[in-house]
Image: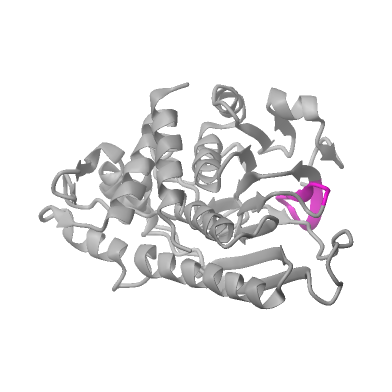
């Protein structure tokens, strides 16, 4: 097992233990009959918009009032992470880091420090395909208003993209940027981290069957009353069409797609997954879905594979223990890792929409 992967797995276990008591999921709310009275045990669902995306949590609980309290805790945890890690909130810890770290070392909380450290491990593991300093150029794009920076502005900001610019001092608990112009964005890992925190929180409350979703990142706890959770992979070009269904039990799944945040200009699709080498939207892939043990890992790997492209991405995913991938390339063709080919995911088409 690669050393960075071992470090990330140990860090994930520690992060979950510390928690206190675009793929769309295709799930229902009906379960098998419970041994308890039907008026007691039931599925409970909650949905909110947090972290700039749709948050959904669904769980089975024998005591509905306790289930509702667990969902309250899930949503509060999502809000807490958003307050700390949003690049759009001036008062967030991440925003403070981006404002001050190029000037001097910035004392930072342990949670943020460890998540940045894990991001760097993903960068090393992927040979730079995953890089949270993409924001050094990324902030120049306005996807809502369809505005892209000029080639000159991208060229000027591009030297800021390099994870090696991030200097961690574990003894002092500080982070510093090696040069001006460096910005970081945890959007490629924070939602998966939040999902994992929430699943750990539910476990601590005795929940045994649940689904937690943050945008394209999902994790299932247990099964769905004796059967697996069925998670669908959407067609990148047809919003309401699923191209595969994957059964999951006690696993995580993340999808990164060029349809999540984008605009088109001059026949070109500009989306938010930037290639660290060019500062431009990665090409050759429409969507990547990763299945693995936890959502922090699957989210980070999905971004890495998207940047790598189909051939290198499949090889990379197959080199990682416990990881499988589905890639939809730029022509709509689907590619699978060997593990999923053996499992034969329920595919509806060999090629997605144009």
User: Is 42 positioned to the left or the right of 137 in the image?
Assistant: right
Q: Residue at x 52, y 32 (%)?
A: 308
What percent of the width, then of the height, locates residue 198? 53, 60
* In the image, residue 9 above or below residue 178: above
Near-viewer residue (151 or 62)? 62
Near-viewer residue (303 or 49)? 49
Quadrant in the picture for residue 183: bottom left
Q: Within the magenta stretch, is there residue 92?
A: no
Q: Which residue is drawn at 28% across and 49% down?
A: 157
Q: What stretch is highlighted in magenta?
A: 226-243
Quadrant in the picture for residue 11: top left
Q: Within the magenta stretch, is there residue 233?
A: yes
What percent of the width, then of the height, locates residue 305? 54, 35
What percent of the width, then of the height, locates residue 89? 35, 72
User: Is 155 positioned to the left or the right of 231 in the image?
Assistant: left
Q: How many marks?
A: 0
């Amino acid at each position: 097992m690669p050393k960075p992967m071992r470090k990330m797995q140990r860090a994930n276990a520690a992060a979950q233990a510390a928690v206190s008591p675009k793929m769309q999921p295709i799930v229902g709310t009906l379960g098998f009959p419970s041994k308890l009275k039907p008026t007691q045990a039931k599925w409970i669902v909650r949905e909110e918009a947090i972290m700039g995306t749709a948050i959904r949590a669904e769980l089975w609980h024998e005591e509905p009032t306790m289930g509702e309290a667990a969902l309250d805790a899930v949503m509060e945890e999502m809000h807490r992470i958003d307050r700390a890690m949003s690049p759009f909130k001036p008062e967030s810890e991440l925003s403070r880091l981006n404002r001050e770290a190029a000037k001097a070392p910035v004392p930072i909380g342990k949670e943020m420090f460890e998540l940045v450290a894990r991001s760097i491990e993903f960068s090393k593991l992927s040979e730079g395909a995953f890089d949270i300093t993409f924001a050094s150029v990324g902030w120049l794009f306005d996807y809502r208003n369809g505005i892209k920076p000029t080639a000159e502005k991208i060229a000027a900001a591009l030297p800021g993209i390099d994870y090696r610019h991030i200097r961690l001092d574990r003894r002092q608990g500080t982070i510093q940027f090696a040069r001006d112009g460096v910005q970081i964005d945890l959007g490629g890992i924070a939602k998966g981290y939040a999902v994992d925190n929430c699943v750990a929180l539910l476990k601590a409350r005795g929940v045994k069957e649940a689904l937690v979703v943050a945008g394209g990142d999902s994790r299932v706890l247990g099964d769905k009353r004796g059967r697996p959770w069925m998670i669908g992979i959407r067609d990148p070009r047809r919003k309401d069409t699923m191209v595969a269904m994957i059964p999951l039990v006690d696993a995580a799944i993340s999808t990164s797609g060029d349809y999540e945040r984008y605009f088109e200009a001059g026949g070109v699709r500009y989306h938010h997954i930037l290639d660290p080498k060019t500062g431009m939207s990665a090409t050759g892939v429409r969507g990547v879905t990763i299945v693995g043990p936890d959502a922090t890992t699957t989210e980070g790997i999905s971004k890495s594979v998207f940047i790598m492209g189909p051939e290198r991405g499949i090889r990379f995913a197959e080199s990682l223990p416990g990881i499988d991938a589905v890639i939809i390339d730029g022509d709509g063709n689907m590619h699978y890792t060997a593990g999923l080919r053996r499992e034969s995911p329920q595919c509806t088409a060999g090629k997605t929409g144009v």
